[in-house]
Amino acid sequence: MCGWLGSMIRSKRQFIYGTVSTMIQLVKGDSAGTVTTYYTSSVGDDHDEIDFEFLGNETGQPYTLHTNVYAAGVGDKEMQFRPWFDPTDGYHNYTISWTPCTIVWYVDGTPIRAFRNYEHTHGVAFPTSRPMYAYSSIWAAEDWATQGGRVRADWTRAPFVASYRGIDLDVCECYGGDCVYTCAGAFGGCGGLTGEQRGKMRWVQHNYRIYDYCADREGSKVPGIECTLPQY
């Protein structure tokens, strides 16, 4: 990324449900004001989206790993973490697993967050009807990305380079019609996480989670009913 000119890659394949993963090496040094992403999104109004976003910081300060999920255009379900490793020192794997039952975010094979489908039982919107593409991008977000916008990008350090490798999609391709239902059957397993995986997730969330929308009592957001329900 140089100046306000960012970059974006979109998959050729459109899909509903499956696993998407890639290896990313984030911007080294001063990355303030930049956002590097790996996410899935549908097209059009009232879109669905599942996010990995990496918010840059000043030299020597840690990245913020930002996750979110949108359903029918409504998001505000952010959970943020500090990486327990240096994401600029080599490549690390980031994976989104999306089934009709649950969305799980993984880092290097470790689950860090789960979001369960409570749409039919409790009315919590969940992405089930809009096929998505996988996207990767880097862009400037000086007004909010780093320390709430207090630290701006130092454009004398441009270009800001994030590297991607080995993008993998194990998905059910879907371009509309009955595939929404047939793919639900193909990826309908609801076995959930193993005990070991749940333990690893609890460890990450206890030690490295820095924001959870369900625990936000200072902002204007009202936690949804899903915040009172188990997610894994």
Image (tube, rainbow, N blue to C red):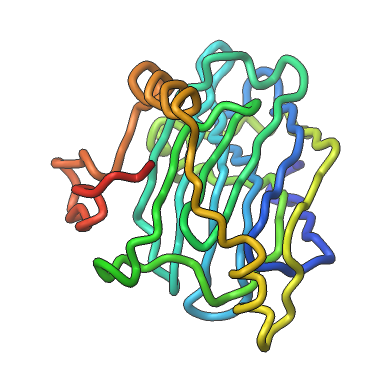
Given the current orientation, which residue lies at the most extreme left position?
217
Please tell me in which quadrant of the rendered image residue 73 appears. Answer: bottom left
Q: Report whether 84 appears left or right of 31.
A: left
Q: Report whether 101 appears left or right of 97.
A: left
Q: Report whether 25 appears left or right of 74.
A: right
* Quadrant location of the N terminus in the rendered image: top right
Given the current orientation, which residue lies at the most extreme bottom position?
177
Please tell me in which quadrant of the rendered image residue 52 appears. Answer: top right
Residue 153 in picture, x, y percent from top left:
58, 34
Residue depicted at 56% across the width and 26% down the height: 110
Residue 134 in picture, x, y percent from top left:
71, 57
Residue 159 in picture, x, y percent from top left:
78, 34
Residue depicted at 63% across the width and 75% down the height: 43
| For residue 174, above or below residue 170 | below
Which of the two residues, 200 or 145, is positioned nearer the viewer here?
Answer: 200
| For residue 69, above or below residue 173 | above
Residue 178 in picture, x, y percent from top left:
66, 86
Residue depicted at 71% across the width and 67% down the height: 15
> How many dots with numbers?
0
Which of the two residues, 169 or 63, is positioned nearer the viewer here?
Answer: 169
Residue depicted at 47% across the width and 53% down the height: 102
* Quadrant location of the C terminus in the rendered image: top left
| For residue 166, above or below residue 15 | above
Given the current orientation, which residue lies at the most extreme top position?
60
Q: Report whether 29 appears left or right of 213.
A: right
